[in-house]
Amino acid sequence: MKYVVLVPDGCADEPFDGLDGRTPLEVAKMPNLSALAAKSLVGRAAVIPDGLPPGSDVGNLSILGYDPNEFHTGRAPIEAAAMGVHLDPDEVAYRCNLVTVGTDGTMVDFAAGHLLSEQSAPIIAALNAALGNGREGVTFHAGVEYRHLLVVPREWADAECTPPHDLTGRHAVLPHGPASDRLIKLMDASRAVVAEAAGEVGSTATQIWLWGQGVRPVLPRFTDRFGVEGRLTSAVDLVRGLGVLSGIEVMDVAGATAGFDNDYGAQRDACVESLADRDFFLLHVEATDEAGHQQNAAAKVESLEAWDSEIIGPLLGTLGNFGAFRMLVLPDHATPLRLGTHTSDPVPYLYFDSQRPGAGGLYTEAGVADAPIVPGHQLMSLMIGGAPGST
Ligand SMILES: [Zn+2]
């Protein structure tokens, strides 16, 4: 038996004025997905449990079959795993954005003009020289573009922090809670260092912004939990980090990006290649989420259509060569165009078993609106154990 999970990040949506009151899943021409849905079980999954932030870290933990209530510690330690940064049990990792904050305290840009990694690396090096490099247990780790990591002692963990992308255009809300003094002190101290280093590389970054903290999560190996070995492809650190932490091998696929230029065919080919010797594969594409954030309806529809023509159609034509297979399609959260950010709403899922066709339905938000809500993390055992109620 082969198991394939397809994750169009943030693809679930709401009726949108710019699409004549329809959702991207309703508008996109997806003949392969429609045909598959007609012989699948479709329903609604709560991938973001109540009380947890609607992030890709939480949603993808659910998709991989780990209850986020039990296993989620924060997003930064998952990114640390993807970056190859080791966390000791007495350490905590923070996401460290380079951001642009105006002189009046407004969060102008959570991504500091999407500076290039070549620009951010010397800024992070300067921060380490001035404030980090292990002094008092504080170390900065350079990541990609505006996304970096701070590792500090565990007693720095207890604070409530606001993600900078939720503050865009608003007065920046500083951390609060027992550890907030330390965080604010470091963020304040970063300004002089960032100002000088950013000036030299022509970046608009003004300071660091700390959020998303957590200690290293302990995930039982995916293989021990579900009895299959697998690989995944994703251009996103959070998904790659979950692979590292759960023992799912992360494939590097040339052309896989987090943007609209993603090479869907290359990721599909990686899936087919991997299934030759491993039974499980997860294929994640970021583009639908990025389109949601940019409130770009055309790009969201286009990405779904690429999923259909370049991934779902060809895969359905190929997977039968391996024998019986099961497939799960679902996003890790909704990213409605109207809002430009993630929500915690349940998302539509599709479960297909080549040996036991389901009752069939429509894979759209409205198509599953009356279905009972299943906890997202249960779908993996449903797929690998076989769905008792799949007819
Ligand atoms: Zn996501």
Image: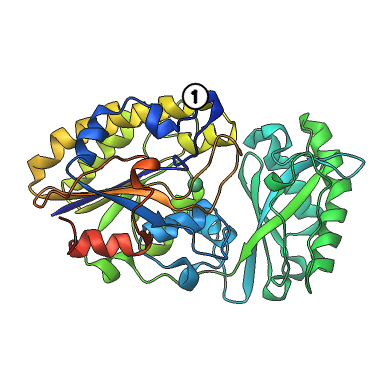
**Is 117 above or below relative to 327?**
above
As rendered, which of 99 and 22 lies closer to the eye? 22
Q: Which residue is drawn at 70% across and 60% down?
A: 139
**Is 213 above or below relative to 236?**
below
Q: Which residue is drawn at 36% across and 37% down?
A: 253
| Corner quadrant of residue 123 | top right
As rendered, which of 155 and 318 lies closer to the eye? 318
> What is the quadrant of the N terminus in the image?
bottom left
SS for dot 1: loop
Residue lying at the far front of the rendered structure: 370
| Corner quadrant of residue 157 | bottom right
For ligand 1, tell me if the residue under mark 1 lies within 8 Å: no
- Is 98 left or right of 368, judged from the image as shown? right
Q: Which residue is drawn at 33% across and 54% down?
A: 371
**Is 299 above or below relative to 125?**
above
As rendered, which of 66 and 378 lies closer to the eye? 378
Q: Is residue 263 in sight in this rendering?
A: no
Residue 223 position, x and y percent, is 27, 66
Disc 1 crowd, CA 10 A, few/some/many (<14, 14-19, 20+): few
Residue at numbered disc 1: 20
